[in-house]
Image (cartoon, rainbow, N blue to C red):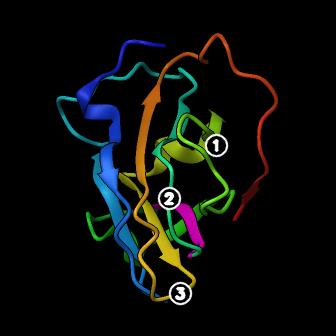
Amino acid sequence: MAILDEKLELCDGTQINCTTTETSILGDIINLGGADLNIGAGTPLELNILVSTRPTSAAVLTLRLYTHSTSAVASGSAIMTFQSINSSLSAGTYIFRGRLPNSIDRSKYIGLVGTQSSETDPTGVLDAWINLAAETDFGLQPSVNSC
């Protein structure tokens, strides 16, 4: 595992807590335009999303990466949509491990946003972080759709 930078961490043991048709921010919002955030000009950014605790309900959570010019990320634009999170995913499963779009450097704020399919809270826990180099042990990338 790569060395993690606290400023590039979206979720750290974050409980999934969404309601039906509501877009909820999961974890932290990263300010890519912050004066104290020097992540390397021209360096590709890698996003990692890990299920740390298996969801226990039948609810399906759709997870997206949003960007916005202000910290109101949930009212911004989805730039990536990821594999749905549901009770079939076991702890330790990566939902996504791969490169962020090159256009991400034009974004000021980014955050993970979830919308769930039913009233039942999925109760899972996520970890998500950005690093500057690909993890060394990942295999084939799960499905992802660019928005």
Give how far apart the Cα atoms at labels 3 and 2 are: 13 Å
Q: Are marks 1 and 2 in contact (CB under 8 Å)?
A: no
Q: Where is residue 101 in the image (x, y as percent from the top left)?
A: 64, 43
User: Which stretch did the figure color magenta?
Assistant: 59-66
Query: Is 75 left, or right, of 58 in this rendering?
Result: left
Q: Position of residue 128 (x, y in %)?
A: 43, 40
Closer to the camera in the image, 118 or 77: 118
Q: Is mark 1 on a helix, strand or loop?
A: loop
Q: Are marks 3 and 2 in contact (CB under 8 Å)?
A: no
Please state, as top left, top right, bottom left or bottom right, where the C terminus lies in the image. bottom right
Give how far apart the Cα atoms at labels 1 and 2 are: 28 Å
Residue at 29 percent of width and 23 percent of height: 5
The amino acid sitting under disc 3 is Ser
Of labels 3 and 2, earlier in sequence is: 2
Q: Mark 1 points at which residue?
A: 101
Q: Mark 2 points at which residue?
A: 55
Q: What element carries label 2?
A: loop
Badge 3: residue crowd in 10 Å (few <14, some 14–19, many ≥20): some
Of labels 3 and 1, earlier in sequence is: 1
**Mainly helix, strand or loop, the magenta region?**
strand
The vertical placement of 14 against 121, above or below, is: above
Residue at 45 percent of width and 89 percent of height: 119
Closer to the camera in the image, 95 or 110: 95
The amino acid sitting under disc 1 is Pro
Q: What element carries label 3?
A: loop
Query: Is 33 left, or right, of 118 in this rendering?
Result: left
Badge 1: residue crowd in 10 Å (few <14, some 14–19, many ≥20): few
Residue at 60 percent of width and 39 percent of height: 100
Residue at 72 percent of width and 58 percent of height: 146
Q: Mark 3 points at which residue?
A: 118
The amino acid sitting under disc 2 is Pro
Query: Is 13 left, or right, of 88 in this rendering?
Result: left
